[in-house]
């Protein structure tokens, strides 16, 4: 079965600036890989800018970071010595002994700075995967634009500076999209496993699973989306059977949680426009341009925008 999303027929042509810069370099630097590395310069600059923006957000650990890391140390101590451990199930947005334990290991090695550094690596990896996904589909220039908009979005920069679940979830979702548009059953299995681990890592991440599966459904043979979907359901299902007594309180707490914001709906809408208004406009323009390529592209644009 052919893919719904077809790659551009004219292929990829190196931009003029790439050729100009490559030829302007000293002869000893003009090797076989020169043009390839020059072409990567915008992405490298973008990653450096994202790193600077995240690293400048320096502050002491806030309550969530401290809670996750300390809980992780408690679980490690419990596993190593048998000492009792406090019940954290309703305090965490994900399985309490997955990310917190990993964060505690990083904290033992390099302190809070290393745990936050891992979050920064996650958003950097997500940025690269956003670009690589579109480049694989034949949209290199569009991939740089998408990666730029993504990397310079406030929440992404903020997540890269925090020792929390969020940056890892962002990277996992980006990885699932990237593997989802590849070919073969191995990448389909990888997509399913990654998506299945998303709600294990953070329960609310489950709302993004259908979005990724729709993209896979439209970008590759249908059986790949079906295989990924079955695995994506089986993994958290197995986690629930194994740890329902430990994670049930957290899931219930998430579902029953009420909004604590003192702002009215009108004020929240205004903040939404101020925070991501430009991003929404860019997404609308991109969606309209994408829709011109056919109904499949239009549906992908609609799903991603939603």
Image (tube, grey):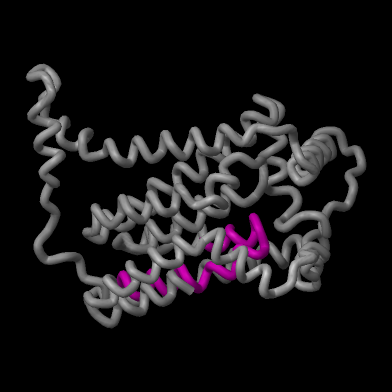
Rendered position, 161 above or below 213: above
Rendered position, 243 above or below 285: above
First to last magenta residue range: 195-220
Residue pictured at 72% horizontal, 58% vertical: 93
Q: Main secondary structure of the magenta part?
A: helix
Task: Report if residue 79 is visible in the image.
Answer: no
Does 277 sit left or right of 36 as displayed? right
Rendered position, 203 above or below 129: below
Rendered position, 186 above or below 221: above
Which quarter of the image is occupied by the N terminus?
A: bottom left
- What is the total number of numbered labels drawn onto the structure image? 0
Q: Residue furthest bottom?
A: 295
Residue pictured at 45% horizontal, 59% vertical: 176
Foreground: 236 or 241? Answer: 236
Q: Position of residue 146 (x, y in %)?
A: 36, 56
**Magenta run includes residue 206:** yes
Q: Position of residue 114 (x, y in %)?
A: 62, 30
**Magenta run includes residue 93:** no
Residue pictured at 25% horizontal, 74% vertical: 3
């Amino acid at each position: 079965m052919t893919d719904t999303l077809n790659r551009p027929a004219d292929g990829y042509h190196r931009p003029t600036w790439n050729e100009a810069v490559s030829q302007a370099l000293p002869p000893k630097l003009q090797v076989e890989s020169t043009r390839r590395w020059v072409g990567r310069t915008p992405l490298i600059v973008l990653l450096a800018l994202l790193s600077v923006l995240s690293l400048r957000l320096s502050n002491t650990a806030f309550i969530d970071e401290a809670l996750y890391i300390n809980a992780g140390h408690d679980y490690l101590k419990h596993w190593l010595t048998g000492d009792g451990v406090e019940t954290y199930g309703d305090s965490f947005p994900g399985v309490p002994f997955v990310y917190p334990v990993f964060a505690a290991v990083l904290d033992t090695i390099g302190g809070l700075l290393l745990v936050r550094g891992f979050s920064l690596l996650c958003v950097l990896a997500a940025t690269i995967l956003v670009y690589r996904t579109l480049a694989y589909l034949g949209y290199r220039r569009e991939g740089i634009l998408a990666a730029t908009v993504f990397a310079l979005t406030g929440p992404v920069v903020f997540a890269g500076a925090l020792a929390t679940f969020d940056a890892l979830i962002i990277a996992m979702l980006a990885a699932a999209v990237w593997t989802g548009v590849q070919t073969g059953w191995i990448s389909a299995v990888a997509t399913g496993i990654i998506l299945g681990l998303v709600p294990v890592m953070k329960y609310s991440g489950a709302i993004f699973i259908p979005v990724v599966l729709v993209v896979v459904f439209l970008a590759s043979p249908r059986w790949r989306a079906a295989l990924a979907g079955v695995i994506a359901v089986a993994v958290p299902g197995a986690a629930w059977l194994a740890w329902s007594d430990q994670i049930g309180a957290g899931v219930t707490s998430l579902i029953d949680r009420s909004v604590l914001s003192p702002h009215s709906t009108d004020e929240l809408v205004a903040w939404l426009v101020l925070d991501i208004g430009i991003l929404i406009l860019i997404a609308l323009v991109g969606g309209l341009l994408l829709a011109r390529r056919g109904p499949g592209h239009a549906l992908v644009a609609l799903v991603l925008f939603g």
